[in-house]
Amino acid sequence: MNTSGKMQQIPLDLALNAPHSLDGFIGGENLLLRALITQLALGRGEAQLFIHGAQNCGKTHLAQAACFYAGQQGRSAAYIDVKKNPSQLDHMNLSHIDLLVLDDVDALAGDDQGEFLLFDLINRLREQEIPLLMTASLPPAACGFQLPDLLSRLGWGITMLIHAPNEAEKIELLRRKAQERGFDLPFESAVYLLQRSPRDLGSLLKIIEDLDHASLSAQRKLTIPFVRSVLFP
């Protein structure tokens, strides 16, 4: 295994000013899941983890956070958005990978070639003892995969549901993500934001990014009037 600390990107197209982190993901009902991902990124415990949950519940956040955490620990991690880049699974070079993360693997369901590529990749990963993290909207048996041998391989590891954060956890998450970007989001402003914007995690994190840019440009603190001006220009 490669322990140089250089994170391989195939492609790691995060487009973020601040990296997703496991610490930035609120625990709550997901404490066990976060612990399992931490162990997986370190190459310990179960070698395969399949997490599923509703759209915008934080799956991609955790997937990318696992890569960053592995990199921080001197391990080489590769992230693939399977929905956007399914061809990356074909003849993939695993020689310098300590952790592989496949986001939205259910995008391959019903695609004969795609399912076979995933089946073959899982076999190769198991042979080379490389940990694998996969995400999907539904558990493997409900994704619509047609290849019986693939379904068997998807059941090799642990399958877990990711729980969407509750209101209090979303407020804490928003404030923590703002802090990671280097600015303060007051509690009152976070509550206002949550009450007047889409509640899904993806949209909320995008708003934090927009507020970051707006506050830097205007040199303003994130008061409720300023947040209102950004949300409703």
Image (tube, rainbow, N blue to C red):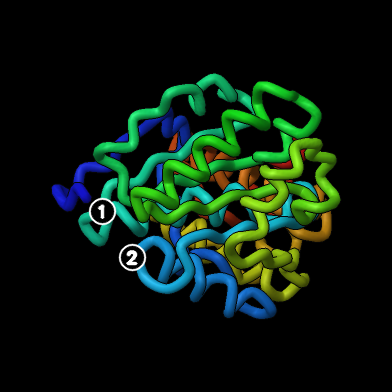
- Give above or below for 191 relative to 225: below
Q: Position of residue 148 (x, y in %)?
A: 75, 43
Q: Amino acid at mark 1?
A: Arg
Q: CA distance from mark 2 to mark 1?
A: 8 Å
The residue shown at (39%, 61%) is 41
Q: Amino acid at mark 2?
A: Leu
Question: Is residue 181 in sight in this rendering?
Answer: no
The residue shown at (76%, 57%) is 53
- In the picture, measured across the screen, residue 66 lies left or right of residue 32, that is left
> Which numbered tag is attached to residue 28?
none
Question: Is residue 61 in sight in this rendering?
Answer: yes
Q: Which residue is mark 2?
A: 42
The residue shown at (59%, 42%) is 103
Depth check, front residue: 62 or 212: 62
In contact (CB < 8 Å): disc 2 and disc 1: yes
Q: Quadrant of residue 38?
A: bottom left
Identify the secondary structure beneath mark 1.
Answer: loop
- Give above or below for 160 relative to 143: below
Quadrant in the picture for the C terminus: top right
Depth check, front residue: 33 or 166: 33
Depth check, front residue: 183 or 156: 156
Q: Position of residue 51 (x, y in %)?
A: 65, 58
Q: Position of residue 17 (x, y in %)?
A: 41, 40
The residue shown at (48%, 52%) is 132
Q: Position of residue 81 (x, y in %)?
A: 56, 33
Q: Which residue is mark 1?
A: 75
- In the picture, measured across the screen, residue 140 lies left or right of residue 209, that is right
Q: Residues within 10 Å of mark 1 (few under 14, many from 20)?
A: many
